[in-house]
Image (cartoon, grey):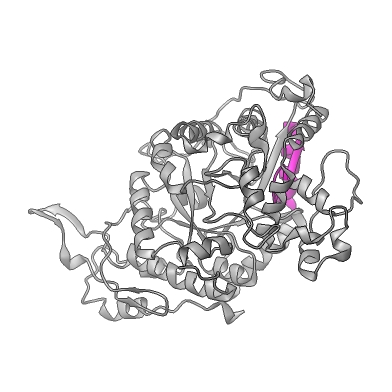
């Protein structure tokens, strides 16, 4: 059934106050003016170079512009909007193959016909343009450790971090799609889970050495006719199971950060161990704040007990999709209208790809929690996502699951007035201890516009987010890492002292000969293997 006029008018409340007191303007104060003791959260926009990221089929919505993902204007417009809303950053996901588990194996029909994260563009290609139209917005970019050699990736990350003046983070993924592996690894199947994380550990070790141990902080001298002092450059001599990287790095150090922010999103046992050791930001998706809090506590415990990383050394983000209206009724109607454009086949392709379970093996109306395997039952135990008007006791059938994925994908939808959505955000923070949220869209840019114009002013009023970007005393913007951990500590652009990369840095004034023994220890650093759990 076609949506009614009142349902399609998603901007009916622009510039007007509804029941929640929404207003299209916000009073921006200096960060120093906000005296609230309320914990301030981090806000990132969750995007990808595709249409309908977590909302398969919504590219058909008349107000959706996500089909324009392969244009520069799409990304520059989004980046300017996010900076206007004082977002911390833009997080760009990626996949390197189609979702082909559903009705598979090797069947990409549903993904292609629905546009479910297919086709895509490479995430780093949009960063320079987005950075050129912003000053403060940080960028988290997804790269898989099976996709290319670490030497090549290190150069790209270093280049982007220079061009953005220290606003880059790397989302480290070990990959999960066989469709990607077959094309990247000469037709081979995806390596076993533990092997992927072993490879990822060595991969990040190479990245650390290239960024931190090959060039001294003061290697670039630009005096007496010398550009870079060769005595302050060394070969990293890496030779281990997966990679052999004997030489020097080809990029000079960026002293604003020295190393891009390390981001990670895995919550398996191996993923938690990797995050606990390396991650500065962990991206988690759960359907309740209680389940989220448990994941956060687990990773913090491993970080503290195994790696000596104290409270506050890792920031945690949860995925959400806000659907905002002037009243609860308007938000509910908007949510249902969005769902009317969803593609059920595309949703099942995404679910099957995310879980590795072909959902087509179950009857369309079967309660999967009653007939499914232990793996799918375990996954669905925490699935409490439902649309407006649905019963708490709704049966978890293929139809139900697919319909819920069409808006918000694999994360919860917060739908209501700006005030009630802010209440829900506050509730999740209070219960789980989460540090912030990855905000994704149902309709692009409408979702982000609603967040910037209505939700963020409400969050600012409560002291939950900053009123403006903080600056250094000289007026320069903060780096990505300084946004996360503050700019007050010494060398605030670099990793915390508890991070495993901290002691790999070749600092100014150190010489190769005086540190030969130390470098040998650093160069032979063996990161803790995933079987340590």
Image quadrant in which you'd find residue 450: top right
Residue at x 67%, y 67% (from the top left corner): 298
Outermost left residue: 224
Whole-percent x, y for residue 434 in the image: 66, 53
Q: Position of residue 530 (x, y in %)?
A: 56, 77
Q: Look at the image and tell me whether residue 145 can be seen.
A: no
Residue at 17% x, 68% y is 231
Q: Which residues are magenta?
A: 406-431
Looking at the rendering, which quadrant does residue 72 occupy?
A: top left
Which image quarter holds the N terminus?
top right
Magenta stretch containing residue 407, yes or no? yes
Q: Does residue 171 appear to the left or right of 422 in the view shown?
A: left
Q: Is residue 366 above or below residue 500?
A: above
What is the x, y in percent for residue 351? 70, 55
Residue 248 vs residue 160: left or right?
left
Q: Is residue 490 magenta?
A: no
**Residue at position x 65%, y 27% in the image:** 62
């Amino acid at each position: 059934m076609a949506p009614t006029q009142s349902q399609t008018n998603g901007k009916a409340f622009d510039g007007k106050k509804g029941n929640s007191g929404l207003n299209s303007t916000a009073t921006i104060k200096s960060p120093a003016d906000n005296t609230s003791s309320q914990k301030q959260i981090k806000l990132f926009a969750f995007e990808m170079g595709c249409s309908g990221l977590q909302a398969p089929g919504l590219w058909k919505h008349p107000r959706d512009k996500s089909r324009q993902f392969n244009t520069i204007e799409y990304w520059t417009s989004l980046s300017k909007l996010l900076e206007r809303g004082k977002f911390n950053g833009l997080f760009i996901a990626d996949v390197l193959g189609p979702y082909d588990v559903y009705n598979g194996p090797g069947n990409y029909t549903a993904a292609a016909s629905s546009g479910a994260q297919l086709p895509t563009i490479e995430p780093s290609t949009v960063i320079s343009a987005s950075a050129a139209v912003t000053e403060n917005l940080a960028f988290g970019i997804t790269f898989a450790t099976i996709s290319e050699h670490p030497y090549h990736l290190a150069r790209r990350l270093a280049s982007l971090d220079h061009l953005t003046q220290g606003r880059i983070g790397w989302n480290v993924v070990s990959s999960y799609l066989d469709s990607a592996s077959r094309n990247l690894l000469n037709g081979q199947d995806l390596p076993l889970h533990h092997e992927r994380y072993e490879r990822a550990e060595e991969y990040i070790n190479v990245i650390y050495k290239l960024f931190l141990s090959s060039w001294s902080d003061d290697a670039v001298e630009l005096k007496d006719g010398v550009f870079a002092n060769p005595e302050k450059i060394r070969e990293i001599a890496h030779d281990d199971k997966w990679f052999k990287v004997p030489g020097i790095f080809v990029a000079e150090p960026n002293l604003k950060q020295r190393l891009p922010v390390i981001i990670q999103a895995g919550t398996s046992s191996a993923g938690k161990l990797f995050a606990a050791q390396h991650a500065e930001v962990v991206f988690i998706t759960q359907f309740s704040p209680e389940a989220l809090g448990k994941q956060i506590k687990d990773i913090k415990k491993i970080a503290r007990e195994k790696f000596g990383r104290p409270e506050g050394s890792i920031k945690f983000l949860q995925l959400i999709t806000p659907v905002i209206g002037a009243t609860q009724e308007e938000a509910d109607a908007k949510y249902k209208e969005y769902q009317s454009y969803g593609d059920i086949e595309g949703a099942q392709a995404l679910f099957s790809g995310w879980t590795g379970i072909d959902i087509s093996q179950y009857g369309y109306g079967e309660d999967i929690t009653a007939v499914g395997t232990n793996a799918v039952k375990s996954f669905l135990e925490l699935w409490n996502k439902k649309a407006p008007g649905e019963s708490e006791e709704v049966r978890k059938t293929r139809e139900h699951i697919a319909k819920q994925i069409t808006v918000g994908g694999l994360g919860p939808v917060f739908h209501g007035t700006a005030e009630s959505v802010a209440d829900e955000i506050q509730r999740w923070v209070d219960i789980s201890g989460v540090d912030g949220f990855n905000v994704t869209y149902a309709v692009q840019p409408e979702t982000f516009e609603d967040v910037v114009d209505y939700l963020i002013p409400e969050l600012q009023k409560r002291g939950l987010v900053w009123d403006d970007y903080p600056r250094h005393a000289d007026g320069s913007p903060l780096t990505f890492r300084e946004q996360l951990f503050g700019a007050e500590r010494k060398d605030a652009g670099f990793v915390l002292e508890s991070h495993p990369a901290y002691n790999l840095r070749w600092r100014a004034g150190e010489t190769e000969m005086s540190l030969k023994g130390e470098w040998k220890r650093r160069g032979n650093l063996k990161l803790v293997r995933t079987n340590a759990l």
